[in-house]
Image (cartoon, rainbow, N blue to C red):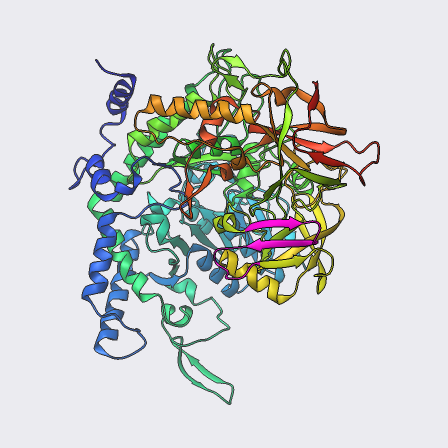
Amino acid sequence: MKNSEDEQKEEFLREFGDDYGYKSAPKNIDQLRATEFKRLAGVVYLDHAGATLYSEAQLESVFKDLNSNLYANPHSQSSCSLNTSDRVGEARTQVLDYFNASSREYSVIFTSGATAALKLVGESFPWSSQSCFMYSMENHNSVLGIREYALDQGAAALAVDVEETADYRNSRGANSAIRLFRHHELRRSERGLSKEDPTECNFSGTRFNLDLVKLIKEDSHNALEGSTYSRGCWMVLIDAAKGGATEPPDLSKHKADFVVISFYKIFGYPTGLGALIVRNETAKLLKKTYFSGGTVAASVADIDFVKRRAGVEEIFEDGTISYLSIASILHGFRILNTLTMSAISRHTTSLATFVRKTLSAMKHENGTHVCTLYGANSSKVLFEGMGPIVSFNLRRPDGSWFGYREVEKLASLAGIQLRTGCFCNPGACAKYLGLSHSDLLSNFEAGHVCWDDHDVLRGKPTGAVRASFGYMSTFEDASNFVNFIKASFVSLPSRTPGVNTLRGTTISPAIEGIGRANPRLKSISIYPIKSCLGFSVNSWPLTTTGLLHDREWLLRSTSGEILTQKKVPDMCHVTTLIDLDLGILFVESPRCKEKLQIKLKSDFPVGKDEVNIHPQRYEVEVYHDEIDIWFSDAVGRPCTLLRCSGQQGYACSNRNRISRLCRDLETKMNFVNEAQFLLVSEESVNDLNARLRSNVQHQFDGELIQVSTSRFRPNLVVCGGEAYAEDGWRSLRIGKTEFISLGGCNRCQMINLSFQGGKVQRSNEPLATLAEYRRTKGKITFGILLRHDDSTGKHSDAWLHVGEEIHASLA
């Protein structure tokens, strides 16, 4: 009997069988994955727009080449150097062949990547007050950066949207049906011109109609009708960093002046290598100021004399090129040539089309659509279909948005690797998400920046989810992805995603009571140094910031980054202990022979500084070099120890403050993430462990993982109540001390780190299991956050004691 997955694949093959799988290649897709990408076992990799993957055969060929041939600096004249130059020449020819470009018309300048190629154009183009840098809105930040060179030299910068004319059906051709809608012209001071377009939008996947190249160069009068630039001499730059991986532009038909690429986007290896493909006639206009080894024919050290080389590559490739990496790209191209670019384009497009169709058909039980797709309805006049990118956001049954970070977090737990955010493409992001200038600036003032977790603000997404396919992607990758979306985000009669569910029953504050006896405080833990190990005590004093000395210190890297276990797992080996009677903080590490002792009152420091964490600005005290050297040895990287000495204000604007962006701002806190205290229940941890055991039994081959309360780094552990009773507490009294609950603690991947045999182990648990029943409104919660109710002002003599009863008021 066939299962639903088999039937789904049969249906897919009926529609896309002619395009999917490389039937005419030496290896079909299943053979390719089984032999060349064994490292993908158990992983669904869907971030090929960010970086595609290298094959095993490709690397084997590279290593065999490097082990068999002697390559040397091509600036020398030895036989091995001349052989290297020949190899580099072969690579240049292969790049031109890939884009169907003639060496008589184009040259290849190797760079460190597409971004470096764009920068080279920006800094060497002869900008003037008569110049204009025009670019489509759907461009990467690396392209927008050219704007700075143009504006600094007095040129104008102009963003445009490519649009159809109202009467395009009666137009004489595709070119005459296209107009460029101009945004506000930018200029910093009082026309060689440049126009930039990507071949494929890395946000939406739409492929631009490359007839735009001819339109801009030969018919700008119509395309820019009414503009002062309509009769200028335009040069066109194509950003092929994304589109070049599956459908490279044909430069024999679309004669752009510049094309930029990165090779890791095309075949995964090597990284740090790209190219600028430039028309030879256009290259003569570029102005190079700096000269270096390899770019000059002659120079004199003590007089102003230099004679530059004549070749385009020789002028612009500063110093010794990355000749080993350049030799390696030949093996990457060889892999693609065995499959053919036409087959790769059809294969990847079939997968993306399947995913788009499946997502667009998904509905909640109330009939509302689950998915909003971006770019799928783009004009056929302006765009040449869709590339292998699927960009979207998801809605709940009530129309509100699932945050893209929630999607990414759950996908990662399911073994699916994808990308979320704006993908460094602010224009496309604003266009497709409907974000105005006011929205963008207000979001920034409220604290939203690239790569943060603020995925929905004022009811609008700030980014999207992107799944992208590569030449080695399979139907199973696509199927697993859409099945994950359905299982995690589609509301069915028996399930509402994103609302806490416990095997069909809602976890809510509706709890009859908290046990026949009041729960009690079982343990108290203090973590003096943020993200290092803490220590437990039977009694401990309270202050205006929480437990005395809790998270009062942190480690900062030399680049200004705050160190945590998520990025520096070795911090888990740094143990701490405070002796209040001695007034000393003791710190130990297996990497350091001596125990460090820091006097709480007299080891202060050599200076003051400020540090921003979350929305909070802190004044900190800095220690002397000996202490910093000790910690640098302990965590295996240069860092400094900082101690909190006061709060200087909030980075969260009052005018634009949004509750979910700002943590507890009503109380003083040290270097904590959200609140003064974190409380977990022993019974809740026991229930979680029971679920972990149950999951392993159902999986048969799963590894049993059990967690202790310490995995969650709580300050307070309670016992004697019902599991998850703490969810319903509005306030509580421990002994004589009052606390206010701030709600559940949102959990991240850090709780998936465990420490066994002196090594850090990573897994998907317990977060994956928590996601099954503790997920609500984009958060996976466990434990509750508290703040000390200081309305009485009695901090000086307040202590907590293990064994004290807890009296809770329900919400």
Whole-percent x, y for residue 177 in the image:
46, 36
Left or right: 411 with respect to 351?
Answer: right
At 57% from the left and 25% from the top, the residue drawn is 777
Visible residue check, residue 643? yes
Between 694 and 90, the one lying in front of the other is 694
Whole-percent x, y for residue 323 in the image:
31, 66
The region drawn magenta spans: 575-595
At 57% from the left and 38% from the top, the residue drawn is 713
Quadrant (top left, top right, bottom left, bottom right) of the N terminus: top left
Between 497 and 711, the one lying in front of the other is 711
Specify whether residue 417 is painted magenta.
no
**Which image quarter: residue 595?**
bottom right
In the displayed structure, 157 sits above or below 482; it is: below
At 72% from the left and 63% from the top, the residue drawn is 607
Visible residue check, residue 378? no
Whole-percent x, y for residue 520 in the image:
64, 25
Between 752 and 282, the one lying in front of the other is 752
**Which image quarter: residue 548?**
top right
